[in-house]
Amino acid sequence: MQQEHVTETAIRRLVVKVGSSTLTAGTDRLNRPQMLELVRQIAHLHAQGIAVVLVTSGAMVTGREVLGFPKGRKDIPFKQVLAAVGQVRLMQVWDQLFSLYGLAVAQTLLTREDLADRQRYLNARNTLLALLERKVIPIVNENDVVGVEEIKIGDNDNLSALVSNLIDADLLVLLTDIAGLYTADPRHNPSARLISEVRVIDADIEALGGKAGSDRGTGGMMTKIQAAKLATESGTTVIIADGSVHDVLERLVKGEAIGTRFIPSESQVESRKRWIISGLASRGEVVIDNGAAIALLRNGKSLLPAGITEVRGSFERGDTIAIKDTNGKRLACGVANYSSADLNRIRGLHSTEIEPILGYEYGEEAVHRNNMVLL
């Protein structure tokens, strides 16, 4: 039976994340024919005027291949050795394959710290947009040589969502070795059904994440759901699909129903708010009472000190903080007008009391509405 097509707005910018299991076709080394097939599709989309950023896993897998598949060691320094060796070969392969279609590539190594700092975030954004403007294919990977935490949790899925935020992508495609998100693990439950569309990523959807699905990759369905949540909150459509499906990228861009499609919860969010919503720069959080929650969510108001019941973490004026209700649900995130120390002194108080208590004031709001993103 022919699959239905989904109405899709015109795709201008596309981020494609390809996992190690897709790059290796289920083996212990890079599968050049499979990689070439992906390159062919990206080249065709590029020729249609679609800007494409490729987020690639596979550095450590490639490092093992280059070093003759060493066994025994699994410590972090050795994983960094594998990543350092493998990244060179991985980029060589991508460069060779894209050159067959006359396309130049640019290696881009990022860490969370690069995206948490506002200035570095803007630098990364400007560089990626400049590369796309010059018809270059940016190939992004985590800087595993220095990113210890990233190696441990394998966060290329979330990195691809952050890259989507960086370039205001219309569509993020997460290619893996499974058809999409299922109601249960299809490897162990024959009655598991593929979920074709997700409109709200709630606790039930997150519970379907399970554990990592492949020994060759360090991510899993859970990180893909996390990535989908981050990207859809910023207005980007996300699709999890099997990377071995014929012409998968071209068919998805046309709107064909393949894999699991996550529908954006918001329209495209302006760039500055994308940075806020990513949460990377979050230094702490505040808990607010029900009255303040209603003022934010229903009335579009700023957050005043009077509505804050608790301040958590240590942060300075200008840092991004999470705003939660009394049940621990994250309602919003925004840029703090006051430090955590100051907010602890003025929380629960009327705005007219700020200056008498602190000796100064930066405005009556703890977080101004213009510097806040509701979730």
Image: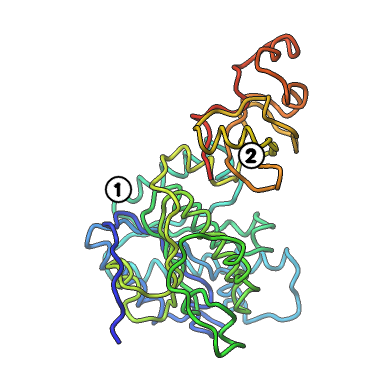
Q: Quadrant of residue 87?
A: bottom right
Vertical arrangement, residue 66 with respect to residue 57, above or below: below
Q: Is residue 44 shown above or below 294?
A: below
Q: Where is residue 262 in the image (x, y as percent from the top left)?
A: 45, 63
Query: Looking at this view, is 194 or 77 the one in front?
Result: 194
Name the secondary structure under disc 2: strand
Q: What residue type is labelled 1?
A: Glu
Q: Is residue 165 left or right of residue 223?
A: left
Task: Return the mark for residue 258.
Answer: none
- Residue holding disc 1: 133
Q: How far apart are marks 2 and 1 (CA)?
A: 37 Å
SS under mark 1: helix
Task: Please report the residue visible at 31 percent of the width from the left and 56 percent of the height from the top.
Answer: 51
Residue under circle 2?
A: 323
Viewed as shown, does residue 285 lie left or right of 103? right
**x and y, in percent, of residue 244 in the image:** 41, 81
Residue 364 drawn at (x, y percent): 61, 18
